[in-house]
Amino acid sequence: MKVAFLGLGAIGAPMASHLTDEPFDLTVWNRTGEKAREFAEEQGVYAEEKIADAVRDADVVITCLPSSREVNGILDKIMSGIQRGALMIDCTSGDPATSRKIASQLAGMNVGFVDAPVSGGVKGAVAGTLTVMCGGTEKDFERARPVLEAFGKKIIRCGDVGAGDAVKAMNQALLAIHIWSAGEALAALAKLGVTAQVALEVINGSSGRSNSSENLFPERVIGRKYPRTFKIALLDKDVGIAAGIVDETQTPAPFIDLAAQLFADAHKQLGEEADHVEAVRIIEEKAGVRIS
Ligand code: NDP
């Protein structure tokens, strides 16, 4: 099966690395060509300079870019090379409306589309254990499944095109809320003299626990190491998509709206390259206390 993978970023590269062996015949493209050339050399696959050349003859084209805006930005180039009957799988954490628009443009060329954002972080991508949430027809989902199984463990069709993006955005809103609320709780406890280590030991054996309290805080806040595996810029984008969905569906959602506002401000303050968990630094600054 010929696969073209476009976008070898922090998560795209480890995902693509699972498609380098039989039955896949992989060609990669990246905006910064050097990264694609290095990847191709290391993995023994092909790299192309031009998108149209990378997608030509591909049965499946995978995109993994920051947002739907960038995917839409290269759509003309994809369409200039892609063959009729191919399938595009967008693993970007995108927005449902843009995905539906892209799908309808591709349908005009008899090209299928599945939005397939992932969860599980860079670690999950390296291990090939990502959760993949999909939107598309049953038929396109079944065509996408063998490719997604290369890097995904739990692969779920959530509904029609855009449904995968919508579920991903809501997952990210929950992640943002968990990070921020755990940060607030630990800041208040620090002022009472309770250390973060002790508080997390209790919380992680109790009903307030989350992935943030179990993994992110021990790894990054306690150790004060913030590896840049997932940028706050991307979480800000994701929670913004979630806020757009609750607005569009007229669902009263003050928590999600507030999370979007807090992460937009944190992104502005911390800059493009900060890690998403560094939002805790803003909480510490406002509270005038160090959590650990
Ligand atoms: P990165 O910022 O590490 O990589 C972004 C990729 O997109 C790079 O290949 C970059 O190319 C390319 N790119 C950026 N702008 C453009 C453009 N205008 N045109 C073409 N290509 C462009 O992001 P991640 O890999 O972390 O994230 C990718 C997607 O996966 C995002 O939607 C993110 O929300 C999602 N995601 C990420 C996770 C993570 O842990 N990192 C976890 C789950 C989902 P270049 O090399 O030239 O900069």
Image: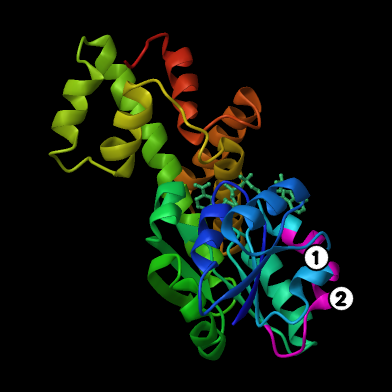
Which amino acid, mark 2? Ser
Q: Is residue 180 visible?
A: yes
Q: CA distance from mark 2 to mark 1?
A: 9 Å
Q: Position of residue 135 (x, y in %)?
A: 54, 75
**Rendered-image quadrant of the C terminus:** top left
Q: Is residue 72 left or right of residue 176?
A: right
Q: Position of residue 80 (x, y in %)?
A: 86, 75
Q: Secondary structure at mark 2?
A: helix
**Of callouts 2 and 1, which one flags the residue occurring earlier in the amino acid sequence?**
1
Q: Is residue 27 above or below residue 198?
A: below
Magenta stretch holds residue 214: no
Q: Position of residue 280 (x, y in %)?
A: 44, 25
Magenta-drawn segment: 71-86
Q: Position of residue 143 (x, y in %)?
A: 54, 86
Residue neighbourhood size for the residue with mark 2, other residues' Cα within 10 Å, grouped as few (<14), some (14–19), many (≥20): few
| CB-based contact (under 8 Å), mark 2 and mark 1 | yes
Q: Which mark is residue 80?
A: 2
Q: Is residue 272 above or below residue 237?
A: above
| Residue 24 figure quarter | bottom right
| Residue 179 figure quarter | top left
Q: Which mark is residue 51?
A: 1
